[in-house]
Structures are given as C-alpha cells and as structure tokens.
Amino acid sequence: MATSARDYDLIIIGAGPAGLSLATSLAAQGRQIALVEKLPRESLALPAFDGREIALTHRSVALLRGLNAWAHIPPAEISPLGEAQVRNGNSHRALRFAPPRAQAAALGHLVPNHLIRRALFAAAASQPNIHLLTGLAAGAIHTSANRATLTLSDGTTLTAPLIAAADTRFSETRRRMGIPAHMQDFGKTMLVCRMAHEQPHHGIATEWFGFGQTIATLPLNGTAAWPNISSLVITLPTRQAEALLALPPGAFAAEMSARHHQLGTLQLVSTRHAYPLVAVYAGRFTAERFALVGDAAVGMHPVTAHGFNFGLVSQHTLASLIAEAPGQDIGAPALLRRYASRHRRATLPLYLATNATALLYTDDRPPARALRGAVIGAGARLPLARRLLTAALMQGATPAHAA
Ligand SMILES: Cc1cc2nc3c(=O)[nH]c(=O)nc-3n(C[C@H](O)[C@H](O)[C@H](O)COP(=O)(O)OP(=O)(O)OC[C@H]3O[C@@H](n4cnc5c(N)ncnc54)[C@H](O)[C@@H]3O)c2cc1C
C-alpha cells in the first residue's frame, strides 16, 4: 500500500468496518482509493476484542462473502442465532422470533466485532489500489463543483471527485461539512462481556426488559473449557454501569447472577467494555462531493442489531450506484441524490421504530409497563405480525447462506 499518490478516485475517512467495506467494494471496480485512519496500522490489522458480538443478517453475510472477508473469519467464531425472544418484567410470556420451519437457516449469525474488522482489513490489504494512510486524522475539507480536497493532520493534501466519511456516529467530518444530525441520547450505558453459564442457551437470544435494567443474552459457540457461553449486554443508567464495571471479576459475576436467573450461575470469561447509548441519524447523507456511510450516516440503538447491517447496506448502495455509471463522475449531484434517497428509504422506518421501542421498554412508569406487556401479548397472539418481523430479520436467507 503506497502513500505517494495524492490524487485519487475516492477518499474515505475512517477504516472501521464501514470504511473498509466501501474501499474493498470500490477497489474491485479498479478505483484508486485513499483510506484515511487516525489509528495506527497495527490496531487495524489485529484489533483487540471489544465486547461487541455483531448479529449479522443473511444479506450481510452474503455481502461479506462478496467482499472476500467472510472466509477470513474462523468458523468456530461464527455462532448461529436460532431464535430471539423478548420478555417484559416478571411476565413469563415472550415474543418469539424463529425462522420458518420450511427454511433450515438460522435467524442470523453472531460474529465478534473485532474479527469482522480483522477480516475486512485482510480483504482490503490484499487490494493494491487501496492506499491506506494510517495514524493520520482527517482535517479541513474543501469542495467545489469539480473536486473535493482533504487536508490531513500532517499537512498532506489529497484530492478526489468524492469524499466519503465513515468516521463514527460522532463524525467530526459530518459537523465540519455543516450537516446536522438527530441524536437520541438515552442517558444510559451498555456494558458488554462474555459469560459462561450452567444452563445451555439452545441458540436462543433473549432481550429482557427488567425494571430499571435491560439485559440481552446472545448465544455463542461453547469451548472445551466453557461449553455454555453467552454475550451479556446490560443497559443501565451510566453511574450504575460504572459501579458494575468497577467490581472485581468475582463480585461482578455474583452481581450478574443475582440480576439474571435464566441461565444459572454466571462466570466472567472476557474483558468488560462500556458504550454510551446514543442513536444518531444524519439530517442529510450527502453534500457537495461528499457522502456519509456507516454509523456516520445512521448510528442505530443496538436493540434491533442493525447498526453494521445498515453500514454494509450503505456502502453497497453507494458502490452499486458508482458501478452503474462507468466512466461518469462519481461525485455527480444526481448520483449522490439517488444514494441519499435509497439509504433513507432503507433505514428511516427501522431507526424510528427502534428508538420508539427502546424508549417504551426502558420507561418504568406504570402506563408504559402495561403497554409493553400488551404489545408482547398482542405480538404473541398475532402470528402474521411475527412472521413479517421474522422475514425482515431473515432478509436474504437462502439455504446457501445458512452456516
Ligand atoms: C454494544 C454494541 C452492540 C452492537 N451490536 C450490533 C449488532 O448486533 N448488529 C449490528 O449490525 N451492529 C451492531 N452494533 C453497531 C456496530 O458496532 C457499528 O454499526 C459499526 O461498528 C460501525 O462501523 P463504522 O465503520 O461505521 O464506524 P466505527 O466502527 O466507529 O469506525 C470509525 C473509524 O473512523 C476512524 N476515525 C474517526 N474519526 C476520524 C478522523 N477524523 N480521521 C481519520 N479516522 C477517523 C476511527 O478511528 C474508526 O476506526 C453494535 C454496537 C454496539 C456499541
């Protein structure tokens, strides 16, 4: 990956999973791409475990295969998600989402985030036309009707017909371009870690909206030492999450065992990680010779597990529109308008529904408690509604995509 060229077909800011995917998609079209990342190269090549287990839809698995990234993920680290259940408070009733019997496929697959990043880095690193500029932050951007120019933290200047920003949900570049964003700060923190447990999980993910806390369990493949392992995601007011994070491992496991009974005694088997719970939706996805992809465009609340799934969709939509216009200006306003409207249609309904659901299920006032119990009861009695939601989760599922 040389760094001498200064003029490119595309400049991408941020080599997270969205930026890496976009670079790889466009490299396959023969484009010269500058991929700018403020982290050092080593932390991209070998990112450490960050607690996140990403639930991938079948469509996302197909996209990762197409990017030659899926083959870089060790099969033992891909956990099938057989079924999902939503529970409310002390009620024994659950809203269940399972694949239709005729279709052997799982609902989706769980893969650790750091392994997705590692795999996408390996795929991108094998492309000679991706010029990776690491340890450098994106700075000032200037755009005109013909060209976009980016200045890096070391003073280097890059130019291209289009700049795409994939620099987190708190994107500095988005703000620099004058694009506002809707931010829903839930005032809570998610604490994530892997825990071994006594009872088997049977491949079932659960989202339990307890009073004052939400605990999700995601079923992972066991190991010889720990046959039953799940990822636990506990959402709490930030000060409570900090107190839990500060507990020594033994006391933490005892506290978690007391809070969550379904899987028996719990034991901590990984590091713990905390993330602020903030959902973000950009007011616009494009500006003059500029596009937002990944979390910088749509930063989802994780409850519906769609953040990176949407990130993959965004890069695929942009790369497909560019592929459909060979020899044409890839930063042309008409192309960017089509990208923005397709991605908005693909994401806005679920973004709004996810935030509304998250607010309802974390509001512990009596009317909200009653309403969510009724929603789960109605969902459990309405097989058609459940079937429609399951179909959305399984979008892109074919027997070939089943693990
Ligand atoms: C607890 C948790 C659980 C989740 N579960 C799921 C799930 O089940 N399914 C799912 O689909 N999604 C899930 N997500 C969401 C998913 O992790 C994100 O959508 C995804 O990681 C975002 O990728 P990205 O590339 O857009 O951004 P990021 O991963 O944030 O990467 C952005 C990159 O840009 C770089 N950068 C930032 N600023 C600059 C700058 N100025 N110059 C250069 N580089 C810069 C950063 O260093 C970083 O490398 C979850 C998230 C959390 C927190």
Image (spheres, rainbow, N blue to C red):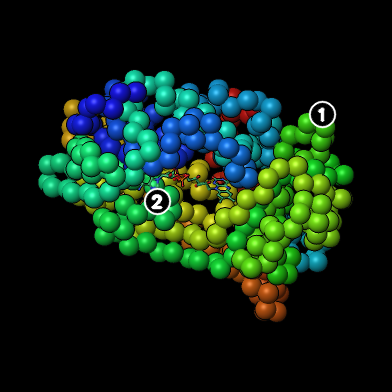
Residue at the image point whose x is 66% and y is 31% from the top: 77
| Residue indicated by mark 2 | 296
Secondary structure of residue under mark 2: helix
The amino acid beneath tag 2 is: Ala
Q: Earlier in the sequence, mark 2 or mark 1?
A: 1
Where residue 6 appears, x then y in whole percent?
21, 31
Q: Residue furthest bottom?
A: 366
Q: Which of the 4 quarters of the picture holds residue 211?
A: bottom right
Which residue, as the protein is rendered here, is positioned at the far front?
Answer: 154
Quick one: which residue is furthest to the left in this view? 145
x and y percentages locating residue 67 in the rendered image: 45, 27
Query: Which quadrant holds residue 270?
Result: top right
| Left or right, 64 with reference to 193 | left
Quadrant where the C terminus is found in the figure: top right
Q: Mark 2 or mark 1, which is nearer to you?
A: 1
Specify whether tag 2 is near ligand 1 (CB below 8 Å).
Answer: yes
Q: Nearer the viewer, residue 128 or 212?
A: 128
Residue at 81% across, 47% down: 267
Q: Is residue 336 visible?
A: no
For residue 355, the mark is none
Q: Is residue 47 above or below residue 370?
A: above
* Label 1 crowd bin: few (<14), some (14–19), many (20+), radius 10 Å: few
Q: Name the image quarter holding the N terminus.
A: top left
Image side of residue 7 versus residue 342, left or right: left
Residue matched to label 1: 224
Report the amino acid beneath label 1: Ala
Count of marks overlaid on the render: 2
Name the one closer to the observer, 3 or 213.
3
Q: Position of residue 218 (x, y in %)?
A: 70, 45
Residue 106's x, y, as percent?
67, 36
